[in-house]
Amino acid sequence: MSTAEPARSVRGDARATGGSLVVQTSFLGDMVLTTPLLVELAERGPVDVVATPANSTLLANHPAVRDVYVYDKRGSDSGMAGLMRLASRLRGRRYSTAYMAQGSVRSGALVFLAGISDRVGFDRSAGRQLYTRRVRYREDRHHAERLWRLAMPATAEPASGQLRPTLYPGAGDIAAAEALLGDIREDGRPVVALAPGSAWATKRWPFYPELAAELATRARIVVVGGKDDTPLADAIADATRRKAEAPPVVDTTGRLSLLASAALLSMVDVLVTNDSLPLHLASAMDTPTVALFGPTVPALGFGPLARRSVTLGRTELDCRPCNAHGPARCPLDHWRCMRELDASAVAAAVESLLQPVTAP
């Protein structure tokens, strides 16, 4: 998966005023999980978003979004000068409310300096002193629901499917994914995508090659991820070559944009992924998902939201979760949460999702 910086205004009329502003300058997965909030707000009026160069690309084509402001807070827009430039642009739009999906002091200062009088964010955020309304941060809820609740009464409950994220790959994204998959479905086998990568080392389950070898004669294997995941894809391909009659692995690492990767996931039968971005892309495309959790746990609020999913992890380990994101190395130097999650258990979960769904 690769990202490219879009134009400063992705869509919309920069002269239009009013509506809501959502600030989301966190990780890519956080932007995916912000889309239920965007859909909710769009039912009330126009919605604009402040995003990073990377996560702004996820909003291309999204019908809930009028305009996107790309805020390169670690690059060309860094420092007070960049903050003031963007605040000046936002001030001219005269937004009624700002929703702080990312809660840093810098983001709070941005909407304060933009003169937005109604500023809504979580009661635990670093920038909460700059908010006019504070919403309880619910540790017991999925993060998509936490974000959705920024715009809802405290007693509101989401309807079925309301929290599932949404993404809208364009025609070019779909064509790029189809070109890489080629005629993979012509032999009639199910297609299983593997996402072995993660920005955090301890989240990377080490047995994807063994899983691929176990599935190789039953299914077609596609590897998804960024260019840094290509060595992991090579190891998966090497493992399947040792299996007689196993077709070649399709390696898409580093060859697709984020939305093209989402399009590809809509074309496979099952995704196996770590607790990382592909999990959330699959949720948005409603792709059946096997999610592998090691140092983190679904209870932190970032589990799969596809209608059919399985989460696996060593629930008996008292040391889990050891970190909100996943440390660079195991604090106890045993990494049992991942090392003791064997490939046969994951393969069984894949097989369960490949079974046809029967009507009740």
Image (cartoon, grey):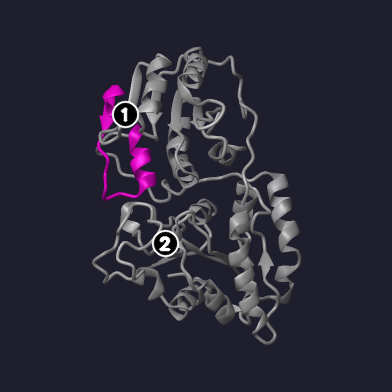
Residue 283 lies left or right of residue 104; in this view the side is right
Residue 354 lies in the magenta-colored region: no
Residue 44: tell me if it is visible: no
Q: How far across and how far down the image is residue 176, in percent?
A: 72, 52
Residue closest to the eye, 104 or 191 = 104
Q: Quadrant of residue 214?
A: bottom right
Q: Amino acid at mark 2?
A: Thr
Q: How far across and how far down the image is residue 175, in percent?
A: 73, 51
Q: Amino acid at mark 1?
A: Gly
Q: How far across and how far down the image is residue 5, in percent?
A: 63, 35
Residue 148 lies in the magenta-colored region: yes
User: Disc 1 versus disc 2: distance between alpha carbons?
Assistant: 30 Å
Residue 112: tell me if it is visible: yes
Residue lying farthest to the bottom in this orientation: 244
Taking the spot 35% from the left edge, 63% from the top edge, the residue there is: 330
Residue position marked by numbered label 2 in the rendering: 202
Q: How far across and how far down the image is residue 242, in percent?
A: 65, 84
Residue lying farthest to the front in this orientation: 333
Location of residue 237 with respect to 116 vertically, above or below: below
Q: Secondary structure at mark 1?
A: loop
Q: Quadrant of residue 294?
A: bottom left
Location of residue 106 with respect to 89 vertically, above or below: below
Residue 226 lies left or right of residue 132; in this view the side is right
Residue 208 lies left or right of residue 191; in this view the side is left
Residue closest to the eye, 270 or 211 = 211
Q: Quadrant of residue 33?
A: top left
Residue position marked by numbered label 1 in the rendering: 127
User: In this picture, which residue range is highlighted in magenta?
Assistant: 128-151
Q: Secondary structure at mark 2?
A: helix
Instruction: Please report whichever mark, 1 or 2, sits nearer to the chain's N-terminal start.
Output: 1
Question: For mark 2, does the 10 Å Cα neighbourhood hold few (<14), some (14 to 19), or many (20 or more) residues?
Answer: many
